[in-house]
Amino acid sequence: MKLLVTFSRKKGRKPIIAQVVRDTGVLINVERAIIDSSEGEALIDVPDEQCRLVSDTMISLGANVRILEHGISVNESECVDCGACISICPREVFSMDSTWKLQLAEEKCVLCGKCIEACPHQALTLPL
Amino acid sequence: MHKSIFLGMHKSIDQINERIRDGTVRVVTAEEMPAIVAELGEAGALKEVDVVTTGTFGAMCSSGAFLNFGHAEPPIRMERIWLNNVEAYGGLAAVDTYIGATQQSDTLEEKYGGAHVIEDLVAGKSVELRASSRGTDCYPRRTINTDLVLENFNQAIMCNPRNAYQRYNAATNSTDRILHTYMGVLLPNCSNVSFSGAGTLNPLSNDPKLRLIGSGVPIFLCGAHGMVIGEGTQHSPAGGYGTLMVTGNLKEMSQDYLRAATMTGYGVTMYVGLGIPLPVLDLDVVRATAVRDEDITVDIMDYGVPSRNRPAIRKATYAELRSGAVEINGEEIRTSSLSSFRNARKVAGELKRWIECGSMQLALPTRPIDAIKSARPMHQISKGPRVLDIMDRQVVSIGENEEITAAARKLLKGDTNHLPVINSENVLVGIVTTFDVSKAVVNPGKAYLVKDIMKKKVITTTPDEAVDIAVQKLEQHNISALPVIDGGHHVVAILTAMDLGKLFGGRWLK
């Protein structure tokens, strides 16, 4: 399951992710992170059964946690099934089925958004 | 019935149209044809199949529509015309215009353009017309502003000068930055390949000798019954790159087969669905329509080279491109199609139904299209300024093992901000700027030699490079000078932002 963790770095520089890994023993996969002097945002992947534990521990350390149930979404009425997104995606989220219709493996998506500008039909959007 | 019209190894167009009328016609798509020929043999396929339908659905930038608005009261001869803030051509009489697909909105730029205006009209949406004129005795009105839907136009005729490319070269990018092109987003270091075209379903690839496709031939155009006008612009069948000029009634078109699009960082284009039915007259038609993706080869061009003569990295067939990956320099590189094969199939399938139900009859060309000509590059009387025209040959360089203070002296004496750094063989190895030297002076004791502070990655130009290309390098890298090097990497001159001022001295302002 994917979690979007946001945290403030104003009150000191707590190594939140490292501490959660140590305290819970769950091996967290950091898919993507943007951290600057004042705040940080990390997209992490954790096993479904340990999601709760990781989430609660993160929150107790002062982070905000949002469970991401959706990856990139395709507006079917705009998509023409060209496939321009396929080679752009670093996680191989997109593929063609046997009828050349675009398929989405949403669970692989790390919400990097690289496909959005590659779509000639503006059919791709990040979930809110 | 089938055998009664099959007299030997030839069928006439009249026989095929007779079969369309009586509902016994056998139609297959160009994708189905290779397997039929493999199974029945060429003679068997000729006997079995009467019509092969083709289809393609992709970005066709050179598209647009003629519109007639009807006369206003009092009447106006429109000279400048905008539809939803997209300018349309004002050089036609009175109330005619041509809206081109790639023209961009004055306000929304690449987010909205001529293609979007056309799609909005086809979708039944209303479009704002704004026009102005000087006013004449016969056309006194000077401005007009009104909202129009498609049915308000007397004529709305799509007329596309260059559609249905027979094939199109694929694209990759060897540079270290992302490129935004009409071939889509190209990742750095040849990390993806994009391609376009319907391969086995492409109309001209199924009739490369242009025996069946020519002026007057009925076609499927964006859901309407359209027609081939003749050869398209840049038609170049000699190398396998034929094109078609086509027309159709916008009022009969469907949004399913006409879509506006924006290639980010490039601009607006229009996705056009186009299909041509091919009458299976003889064995030559059978052989031509048996073409498969495996038989159609294109070059994968390096769009990192900003020249008309881009180098080809390798060749690939549509079968390879459509497989999802091709090998470049020993690596599997993923491919993306820009055109929709699924929609190309839909076009060929819809066209097949039209013919089966008798709503479209076939015709042979009233005038053939040249099948052997080649498009020529532009005739240019002057090549435009090259780097050698404006570069500064009084370039001062410095050795990599010289001291930083020597660099400071040279910068002062040479009245320059950039020093190319050379090694003992006089080969360019780096560059230092006034900024680098100042930084070294402010932080003393960390570095003594030029090679310790120089930037090793130098962006360079050559004497015969176009100034426009050199200017793009300056902009992209946010720098103000380029060492000019020869084939052996020796510095022969320097081009600075100041040299660009020479362009405005009049010599190049023709």
Image: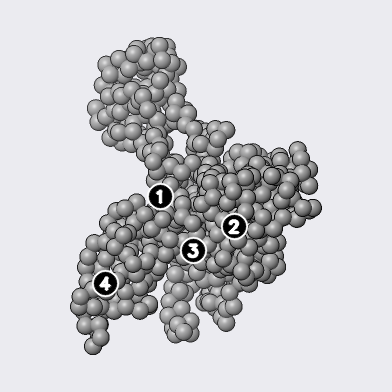
Query: Is residue B505 something that shows in the picture?
Result: yes
| Disc 3: which residue | B247
Q: Up-down: is B160 above or below A20? A: below
Alpha carbon distance from label 3 to label 2:
16 Å
Q: Residue at x 27, y 56 (%)?
A: B126
Tell me which numbered mark, 4 or 2, is placed earlier along the sequence.
4
Q: Chain of mark 1?
A: B
Query: Mark on residue B255?
Result: 1
Tell me which numbered mark, 3 or 2, is placed earlier along the sequence.
3
Placement of the N terminus of chain A among the 4 image quadrants: top left
Q: Amino acid at mark 3?
A: Thr
Q: Answer with left or right where residue B250 lies relative to residue B230.
A: left
Q: Amino acid at mark 1?
A: Gln
| Disc 2: which residue | B362
Q: Position of residue A123 (x, y in %)?
A: 40, 42
Residues at discs 4 and 3 both on one chain = yes
Query: Is residue B423 something that shows in the picture?
Result: no
Q: Are marks 3 and 1 in contact (CB under 8 Å)?
A: no
Q: Are marks 4 and 3 in contact (CB under 8 Å)?
A: no
Q: Position of residue B445 (x, y in %)?
A: 46, 49
* Label 4 neighbour load within 10 Å: few <14, some 14-19, many 20+: many
For discs 4 and 3, the disc positioned in front in the rendered view: 3
Residues at discs 1 and 4 both on one chain = yes
- Between B352 and B32, which is closer to the camera in this rendering? B352
Helix, strand, or loop for circle 2? loop
Query: Mark on residue B131?
Result: 4
Tell me which numbered mark, 2 or 1, is placed earlier along the sequence.
1
Q: Position of residue B192 (x, y in %)?
A: 57, 44
Q: Residue at x 31, y 60 (%)?
A: B151
